[in-house]
């Protein structure tokens, strides 16, 4: 494991930027083909699949069907909401995360899923009524009325900054991350499997970030599998007695790991829907298949079809956290329309993680960060 996670260095910043930008790049590569099947993507690209930023091919998601190449969607947007709240609260505040979600909702509901939108509306009603209506952000979302109705990937979209803040910074704390990630997920989603999926993804991201590319790949894969499964087992024992959901998330994750070396089965049997129980296990398995190769991993995830922007962003966050910003294809970084904004958010989070107040002119920063603070 890298010791850099405990100190504020240029290498650490490259890792954090890699995760943030990797998330955005994967999102932007997947946006033009979101909702399309693997076969439809191949047909729309002359059999090549997505290889670069392209014009939109899908027509089902109206918010994104006219976006120019290199544009991101709600996956990046919601991750940045989490990051901004962590920075202004100097840590995790579920109350502020709820208010930040409402602020973003008022500014833009660009491509949001129905479950996240409903939660934002309920929390907004609570805020605007002085607590007389709606739902306080610290009160979990109600259970879904139908199976899968509240089991989307919204919590997973938001988890990267939280995983970085709690698991990679000074005083890394597994149990705090579990508690914070579950609370953040349950704020919007009533199916606990969506939140448990975000915990699994957060720990996978941390494992990628802590492991240098020189590590033996098969050993790394086995270690991540064992660690993530142990985390999920512990989380399910702690939480699902309150709201049992079947099959449990662990069943889907076990299946994904069993099919790791069969990309066709992984794509057809695991990547089966837009629910977190399918997208998160598929993304983790795909990232592990290409743990040191950003291009191959993200393109395999995107070209599998279905929830392409979310899968692309998750795979991009994992592999990007391992290889760093410098090893993400330069043409993709340069073509990412929100690149400067995303990098600025990464830099801000890095400073706050290490106790630097960006508004305090008296602090002492490394030379390579001074311009980022002014």
Image (cartoon, rainbow, N blue to C red):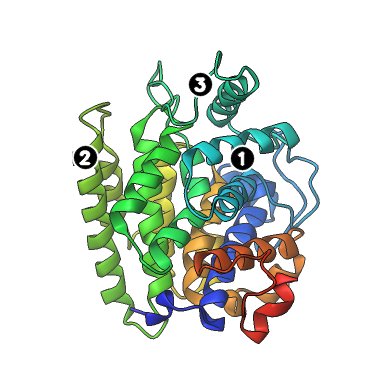
Quadrant, the C terminus: bottom right
Q: Considering only order in the chain, which callout, 2 or 3, is on the residue closer to the N terminus?
A: 3
Tell me the quadrant of the picture where the N terminus can be found. Answer: bottom left
Q: Residue 238: which disc?
A: 2
**Depth check, front residue: 274 or 239:** 239
Q: Quadrant of residue 352?
A: bottom right
Residue in the picture at 45% in, 79% down:
7
Q: Is residue 264 above or below residue 347?
A: above
Dot in front, 1 or 2:
1
| Mark 3 to mark 1 CA distance (whole Å) | 15 Å
Q: Which secondary structure lies at badge 1? A: helix
For mark 2, give the secondary structure: helix
Determine the CA span between mark 3 and mark 2: 24 Å
Q: To which residue does mark 3 refer?
A: 135
Determine the residue positioned at 42% across, 75% down: 5
Residue 100 in sight: yes
With respect to residue 268, does 211 lie above or below?
Answer: below
Contact, mark 3 vs mark 2 (Cβ under 8 Å): no
Residue 137 picture location, percent across and down: 49, 30
Instruction: Name the residue tied to disc 1.
Output: 100
Alpha-carbon span between mark 1 and mark 2: 28 Å
Residue 209: percent from left, percent from top: 43, 71
- In the picture provided, is 139 more to the left or to the right than 301? left
Q: Report the front residue among 325 and 359.
A: 359
* Residue 215: % across, % down: 34, 82
């Amino acid at each position: 494991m890298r010791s850099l996670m405990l100190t504020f260095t240029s290498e650490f910043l490259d890792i954090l930027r890699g995760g943030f930008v990797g998330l955005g790049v994967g999102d932007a590569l997947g946006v033009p083909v979101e909702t399309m099947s693997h076969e439809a993507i191949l047909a729309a690209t002359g059999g090549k699949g997505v290889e670069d930023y392209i014009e939109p091919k899908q027509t089902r998601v109206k918010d994104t069907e006219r976006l120019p190449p290199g544009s991101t969607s709600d996956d990046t947007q919601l991750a940045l909401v989490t990051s901004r709240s962590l920075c202004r609260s100097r840590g995790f505040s579920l109350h502020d995360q709820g208010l930040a979600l409402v602020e973003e909702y008022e500014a833009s509901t660009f491509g949001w899923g129905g479950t996240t939108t409903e939660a934002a509306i309920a929390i907004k009603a609570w805020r605007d009524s002085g607590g007389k209506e709606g739902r306080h952000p610290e009160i979990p979302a109600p259970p879904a009325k139908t199976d899968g109705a509240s089991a989307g990937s919204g919590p997973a979209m938001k988890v990267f900054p939280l995983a970085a803040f709690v698991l990679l910074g000074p005083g890394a704390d597994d149990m705090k991350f579990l508690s914070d990630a579950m609370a953040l997920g349950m704020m919007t989603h009533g199916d606990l499997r969506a939140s448990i999926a975000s915990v699994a993804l957060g720990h996978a991201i941390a494992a990628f970030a802590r492991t240098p590319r020189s590590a033996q790949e098969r050993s790394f894969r086995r270690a991540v599998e064992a660690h993530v499964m142990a985390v999920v087992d512990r989380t399910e024992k702690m939480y699902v007695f309150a709201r049992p959901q079947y099959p449990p998330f662990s069943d889907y994750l076990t299946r994904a790991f069993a099919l790791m070396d069969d990309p066709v089965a992984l794509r057809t049997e695991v990547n089966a829907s837009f629910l977190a129980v399918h997208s998160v296990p598929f993304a983790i398995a795909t990232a592990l298949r290409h743990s040191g190769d950003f291009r191959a991993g993200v393109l395999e995830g995107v070209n599998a079809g279905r929830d392409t922007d979310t899968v692309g962003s998750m795979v991009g966050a994992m592999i990007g956290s391992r290889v760093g910003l410098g090893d993400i294809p330069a043409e993709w970084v340069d073509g990412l329309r929100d690149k400067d904004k995303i990098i600025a958010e990464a830099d801000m989070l890095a400073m706050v993680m290490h106790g630097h107040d960006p508004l305090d002119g008296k602090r002492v920063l490394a030379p390579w960060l001074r311009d980022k603070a002014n």
